[in-house]
Image (cartoon, grey):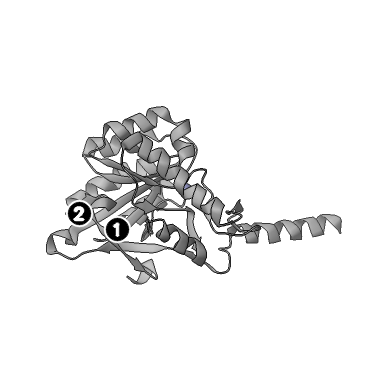
Amino acid sequence: MKVFLTVISMLVVSANVHAQPVGTTEVHSRLAQPTGSAATAVALTLDACGGAYDADMISTLIAMRIPATVFVTKKWLDHNPAGTLTLLAYSDLFELEDHGTAHVPAVIGADSSVYGMAGAPDLAHLEAEVSGGAEAIRSLTGHAPQYYRGATAIYDQQSIQAIEALGYSIAGFSVNADDGATLSQEVIVARLRAVRAGDVVIAHMNKPDGATAEAFAIVLPELLARGYRFVKLSQAHLKRIRDPARN
Ligand SMILES: [Zn+2]
């Protein structure tokens, strides 16, 4: 009986860990395309949450001259000086935007959490998470970030208002390429092949053991051959969408 109850409680815990909390939103965005020339634009956004530096991913982009917007945490910058130097050395290709200080999800409350990661206990902690990441970027580049993407890309209503009140646009996405670099190369390739003009692609550059870099090396030449061009978020405007599958 005790074993049975343990199994049941583990199932309950794992279900909670993977459920999006009630009252929260995963923010989705596409590129607003005011002119004909932008009709082939796609934005590549790469998250550097914590962890390591996927040098293969960045080398591929450098070799193909493909720009990307990189959402870095202060934690990632502090732990990856070589990767940071490479991003800064290719500032024509890579712009740094704010992914927070310590990769704390932008949900507020003493018991708040997303996917098992604790949120910000109160508004002041959320603001410190946002500002600490921004300050780390400003001290490296001299530029203040314009976009914020919270850890897990899930927000509550109070955090969305607070982040926007600090002057940031929230960077959603329309194509989740790698689910945190957890997917197989085959699945990532399939998701990337489904990219359309105006998409904002999210992927990760902090897990070199994952299959993300290999999948991008296969599909990026195909996307270029299809006529897409890649833009950084600073060159674009985002529009919020409700459901990526329907837009
Ligand atoms: Zn992240």
| Residue 165 occupies quadrant | bottom left
**Quadrant showing the C terminus:** bottom left
Disc 1 marks a residue whose amino acid type is: Val
Which numbered dot is residue 228?
2
N-term mark: 2 or 1 = 1
| Residue 15 occupies quadrant | bottom right
| Residue 161 occupies quadrant | bottom left
Q: Categorize mark 2 by other alpha carbons within 10 Å: few (<14), some (14-19), many (20+).
A: many
Q: Is residue 98 above or below residue 195?
A: above
Residue sitting farthest toward the right: 1
Disc 2 marks a residue whose amino acid type is: Tyr
Which numbered dot is residue 134?
none
For image coordinates 18% across by 62% down, the residue present is 39
**Quadrant showing the N terminus:** bottom right
For image coordinates 42% across by 53% down, the residue present is 149
Which x, y percent locates residue 76?
46, 37
Do callouts 2 and 1 mark residues in contact (Cβ within 8 Å)?
Answer: yes
User: Foreground: 222 or 60?
Assistant: 60
Which x, y percent locates residue 131?
45, 47
For image coordinates 55% across by 63% down, the residue present is 20
Secondary structure found at label 1: loop
User: Foreground: 22 or 167?
Assistant: 167
* Residue 205 in view here: no
Secondary structure found at label 2: loop
User: Foreground: 110 or 43?
Assistant: 110
Which x, y percent locates residue 195?
29, 58
Question: How far apart, in angstroms, are the residues tagged by discs 2 and 1?
Answer: 10 Å
Which numbered dot is residue 195?
1
For image coordinates 41% across by 44% down, the residue present is 134
Q: Categorize mark 1 by other alpha carbons within 10 Å: few (<14), some (14-19), many (20+).
A: some
